[in-house]
Amino acid sequence: MMSDAVSFYRKLSVVPSRKLPIQDAFQSFFPEYAASHSVSSEQSKAARCISECKTGAIGYNISYCKTCGHIEIHACSCNNRNCPNCQSPQEQKWIMARNSELIEGCAYYHSIFTVPFELNDLIFENQKLLYNLMFHCTSETLLTLCRDKHHLGATPGIIMVLHTWGQQLNFHPHIHCCLSGGGLTESGQFIESRHKGFLLPVGAIGKMFRGKFMEKLKIYHEKGLLSLHGKCSKLRNHYNWKEFVDSLYEKKWFPFIKETFNGNGNAISYLARYAYRTAISNSRITSVTDTKVTFRYKDYADNDASKLKTVTGAEFIGLFLQHILPKGFSRVRFSGFLSNCCKTKKLKLIHKLRNTIFISNPVKGKSMAELMLLLYNHDISVCSQCSGHMIQFPRGKPCKNSPLRRSLT
């Protein structure tokens, strides 16, 4: 049956496929880029996944209706977190999971932690170490200030998402946070901020974040944990390092914090764009030629005007690949009463204190068929022709001789 289904799929090659410009860019330009540039195993894997996603090269999901004999075939998605072609289900799943952790009636705040651009080269050279440091300092800054009785006087719930790109695909590491305006006190009570629309002073956040980050950075340097190569090689000199550190202390580090607009669910949807979307979407790429890629970006310095940027194919690949995170590195972190080690216990306590109903994660442990029904109201086990029962076959082997470059669905 499976070989018949694949044969049937080949016959449909005349049907036009969806246009995926980022896939065109990687198929056209990555081999040449990889031949002349150093590419990590994680970057190479991401490039391969983007090039093969929904083309049939990864395999097929095949369903057969035992009532009418109808066959449905879908080329498999790569499910690589850097692929912009297949992250929508994961994004929606994450949103539903996080929405179940929101406290009804409690204000939530959106906060952004960024670092001076002078640190960009050093962070890029030491991604895993310094991304972790950014997460740690962000969490410690918010928890320390919120626990202060002059502010909230309690431990809030924090969701943090690392974001490394700007609109023009430039390297711009910063962390977006969703922060609850209420938290648990040491005595186990849940209290909320006394000042509506205000939680923490921006000046205090910036100074504390800078202090914590720079203190750890100097320790890393003293212990020889920092990689100082390429553009950072000059920092091997003791006097250059001291001058570099002093210049960072002199700068004002500008954080951002304000109450979320249009409710708490909006805050989660906003964060999901960074948790499950990559540096650029297909919709922003306007054209891919034999040598160049043109994409749309928003110029924040010019009243958010929409503009076009054209780069060579190799330059586009390089811009995209610099945002591939190290292997195993998590882009999303939780802190406060949302820490993974105590999340369920603390949420149950908060709902009990507020006399509200605790709802567990609605997508945990669900099969793909159950998720598709829950997220998109589409039952993949029902035949679209006769409403009979569809049998799901194991993933089919790739057709290496298939003339198709992309999936039909």
Image (cartoon, rainbow, N blue to C red):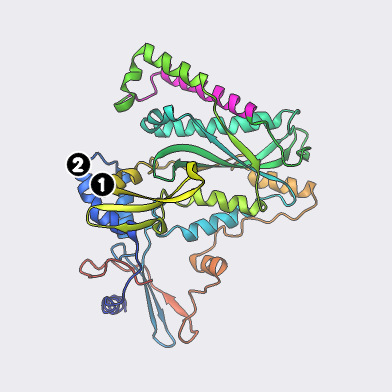
Amino acid, disc 2: Ser
Q: Which mark is residue 354?
A: none
Q: Residue 178's image quarter?
A: top right
Find residue 346 and report its horizontal and vertical position in percent: 69, 43
Image quadrant in which the N terminus is located: bottom left
Position of 161 compared to 222: left or right? Answer: right
Q: Which residues are magenta?
A: 203-228
Instruction: Say which amino acid is labelled 1.
Output: Ala
Please give left or right for residue 384 compared with residue 393 in the image.
right
Residue 205 part of the magenta segment: yes
- Residue 258 lies in what quarter of the image? top right
Q: Which residue is mark 1?
A: 314
Q: Is residue 331 visible?
A: no
Crowd class of label 1 (few under 14; some 14 to 19; many from 20; radius 10 Å): many
- The x and y percentages for residue 289 are 25, 57
- The verdict on residue 163 being magenta is no
Q: Which quadrant of the figure contains the C terminus?
A: bottom left
Q: Position of residue 238 (x, y in %)?
A: 37, 12
2 and 1 marks in contact (CB < 8 Å): yes
Per the image, the residue denoted by label 2 is 36
Tell me if residue 365 can be seen: yes
Residue at figure coordinates x 41%, y 50% from the top left: 307
Q: Secondary structure at mark 1?
A: helix
